[in-house]
Amino acid sequence: MTDIPVGMKSETMDTHGRSPGVMLRSLVIGLTAFLTVVDLFATQAILPSLTRHYNVTPAAMGFAVNASTMGMAISGLVIGLLSRHIDRRLGILFSLAFLAVPTALLAIAPDLTVFTILRVTQGLCMASAFALTLAHLGEQCSAMDAGGAFAAYITGNVVSNLIGRLISAGVVDTFGLASNFYFFAALNLAGAVLVYFTIQRAQPMHAMPMAGSPFAAMLAHWRSPALRAAFGIGFCILFAFIGTFTYVNFVLIKPPLSLGRMELGLVYFVFLPSVLTTLLAGAAVNRFGTRPAIWGALAVAASGLPLLLSSRLTAAVTGMILIGMGTFFAQAAATGFVGRAALDNRGVASGTYLACYFLGGLVGSAVLGQLFDRFGWAACVAGVGATLIVAGLLTTRLRLPPESG
């Protein structure tokens, strides 16, 4: 086994056989995730401002902002199919570098159509980097390391939700909408620089020759009841997450809560507890198993839904904290499960999972946006609750094949 199983600069081992760079490895993995997807949700913090700027409805603006998930679903699937032909390091590097282009162009998008197209393009770049990194981790990590590596990567995703929204709200409040997108383009380039200096080319530890075509590999994964259920869980998780954290913005700025733009950004400290709890996902799965870990996470998320209907800010914030903790924890556990359950062609499996995950976000923004516009916030919350129930039922089918051990 390599000293640093994710293909980063190797270090010596201590007397207990552990790398003193494990914490540094986790930090780099998390920072890479942060810089990969920071654009995805940061824009949600300025949804009310964008709605006024383009003079559209909350549902229309919510769909446009979340159109990035359409690009992510497409890219995740394509990258999964072509994964064996793509150099992991170069693929991640070029994806992050090119991501800066549509991000900067958002500053001068003349209308909602162009804005939506640029968000889709962002999604194509983000998901290619995301999928290739997950495939890289799955190939380079041993079974013991995989849980911690995937948890670190998802934790970086969590941090991007918090810091990205805070930055976006602060930059827009101080310098205006255009400056926000230029700033995030610079972050994208920083991600490319990080990958250039920290990820080495490496031969996959667990790579196996593909017996058939990528499409045959994908069909084989879909025939697995456990993987099929995991794909469905991913769909439900982002469906619920986007349904909650897109449209709650419009609730928070209206009476009786009436938050200002910067106050709305500060509310997203609700993701801070998720940073801590998501890091524990790998250990929880190892100790209790994947199914109990996901069921517990979904129960935590569901317990926050009634609080979102409260007219008190403290109750609403508590509900957001619980939903953030639950959905991110479940996402970390489900992602790790796919990496272990796919006996071969892990790149295809990861890409298929991400396609379903991000498709869930797109469908969630569209369906729950219509519920929000037509029937109000309570109907939107009910839709989120129904989705969490479906995810819980799918979790019953998560069983690792004997060969994965």
Image: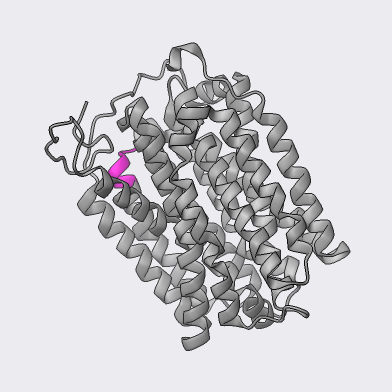
Residue 226, percent from left and from top: 60, 23
Q: Residue furthest right?
A: 375
Q: Is residue 62 visible?
A: no
Number of numbered markers: 0
Colour scheme employed for the rendering of this structure: one colour
* Stretch of the chain drawn in magenta: 86-91
Q: Is residue 323 visible?
A: yes
Residue shown at the point (44%, 17%) measured from the top left: 404
- Whether residue 288 appears in magenta in the rendering, the answer is no
93 in relation to 11, above or below: below
Q: In what quadrant of the picture does the C terminus appear?
A: top left
Q: In what quadrant of the picture does the N terminus appear?
A: top left
121 vs 204, nearest the viewer: 204
Residue 339, percent from left and from top: 45, 30
Residue shown at the point (69%, 72%) measured from the top left: 313
Residue shown at the point (45%, 67%) measured from the top left: 163
382 in relation to 226, above or below: below
Residue shown at the point (66%, 48%) measured from the top left: 301
Q: Main secondary structure of the magenta part?
A: helix
Residue 367, percent from left and from top: 77, 53
155 vs 187, nearest the viewer: 155
Residue 187, percent from left and from top: 36, 67
Q: Is residue 173 left or right of residue 260?
A: left
